[in-house]
Image (cartoon, rainbow, N blue to C red):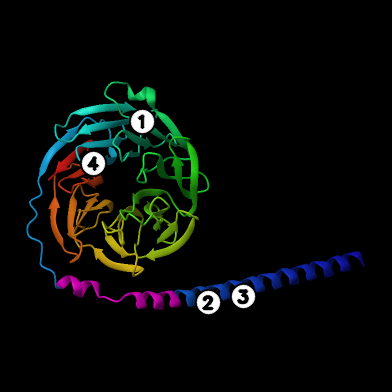
Amino acid sequence: MASVAEGDQSDSGSAQRSEVVEQTKDTIEELRKEIERLKTRLEEERKKLNDINFASAAQRLDHLGNLNIKQRRILKGHQGKVLCSDWSLDKRHIVSSSQDGKMIIWDAFTTNKEHAISMPTTWVMACAYAPSGSMVACGGLDNKITVYPLSLEEDVQTKKKHVGTHTSYMSCCLFPGTDQQVSRPARKARSGDSTCALWDVECATLIQSFHGHGGDVMSIDLSPSETGNTFVSAVRMQCLIIQLLKHSAFATSQGCDRQALIWDLRNGQCVQSFEGHDSDINSVKYYPSGDAIATGSDDSTCRLYDLRADREVAVYSRQSIIFGVNSVDFSVSGRVLFAGYNDYTVNVWDTLKCNRLCILYGHENRVTCLKVSPDGTALSTGSWDFTLRIWA
């Protein structure tokens, strides 16, 4: 009798489990249908915002003439791959970081090194100039963001200050319009969940943290708008972009769903998303007006997303281009888009007509970073060939 009772209980338990499984399947199917309905509604709303044909409008514009961009300086001094660089607002100085564990402050006019700062780790992956030009921030595999006040009279090593620490490496950083704050993204080593954070430099305290990325956040950019309060970040290993509202927002380009997400820095909520790339997004950059963002990806394309139309409006690619894009930046007017590739070149694109204007040759390994100077008269590029080059 006992065995019969146990058999009945077992059959009952199996039936209950089967019922739960069926209910779960029904719930998942209902959720999938709801997702499709929401996607359809979103596309309908986007079409309403698409009140102009970007391609036809660009056809009415005159073609740009030949761009006589030439290599003017070579900055030599790093003993490892150059991973990041940034211009000072004085339009003369550049900070660069490298796999050799050094951060160097350069005079771009004379090619002299004004400071060579040793870090406690190799692979210094991030560096940024403060708006005042009186300090720089950097970080990398030491998981820390460190600020160095710059002075020719004192040893900058003695004045360094650790602002924040993360559970894994720091991939990039910037000062959001003030010397008192610094933003940086990083990756949690075990969970794979990427985060971005805003730190108070003076107090070394965390102001805001953003969670939800599906991969390593590799690039961030501050909105140029005076009232935008946003910054954009690029996530690698899936394609996600996050943007927030200036000093109170940012964007990332990486996520398992290959999306670009827009986040409000003030409340940490995602407010906008974009799709389009087929591989990792390595770099993001705001259009000078702050109304659009450009992305560069391992799928060999650059793309332009209009924030007001809430959609992709342009793709920069050619059949002959098969190498990934590591870095992008705009000219001051926004008419020209510069992109650094793994094939050692910089491709120069007409932002509006989407045609390639020219190719810059000179580096002997992949171009990892590029920056247009604040006045737009020069372009700096960094490479795995251990050098930085100045083009004008």
Q: Would you identify the image quadrant in which residue 13 lies? A: bottom right
Around disc 4, counting alpha carbons within 10 Å, would you say few (fewer than 14), some (14 to 19), or many (20 or more)?
many
Which marked residue is nearer to the observer: mark 2 or mark 3? 2
N-term-proximal mark, 3 vs 4:
3
Q: Which mark is residue 26?
A: 3
Cα separation between marks 1 and 4: 22 Å
Q: Amino acid at mark 3?
A: Asp
Which marked residue is nearer to the observer: mark 3 or mark 1? 1
Q: Are marks 3 and 4 in contact (CB under 8 Å)?
A: no
Q: Amino acid at mark 1?
A: Tyr
Q: Which mark is residue 382?
A: 4
x, y percent for residue 255: 43, 57
What segment carries the magenta color? Answer: 40-59
Q: Which mark is residue 33?
A: 2
- Give the position of the C terminus as an image quadrant: top left
Q: Amino acid at mark 4?
A: Gly
- Give the position of the N terminus as an image quadrant: bottom right
Q: Is residue 232 left or right of residue 365?
A: right
Question: 361 or 150, which lies in front?
Answer: 150
**Residue bearing the label numbered 1:** 148
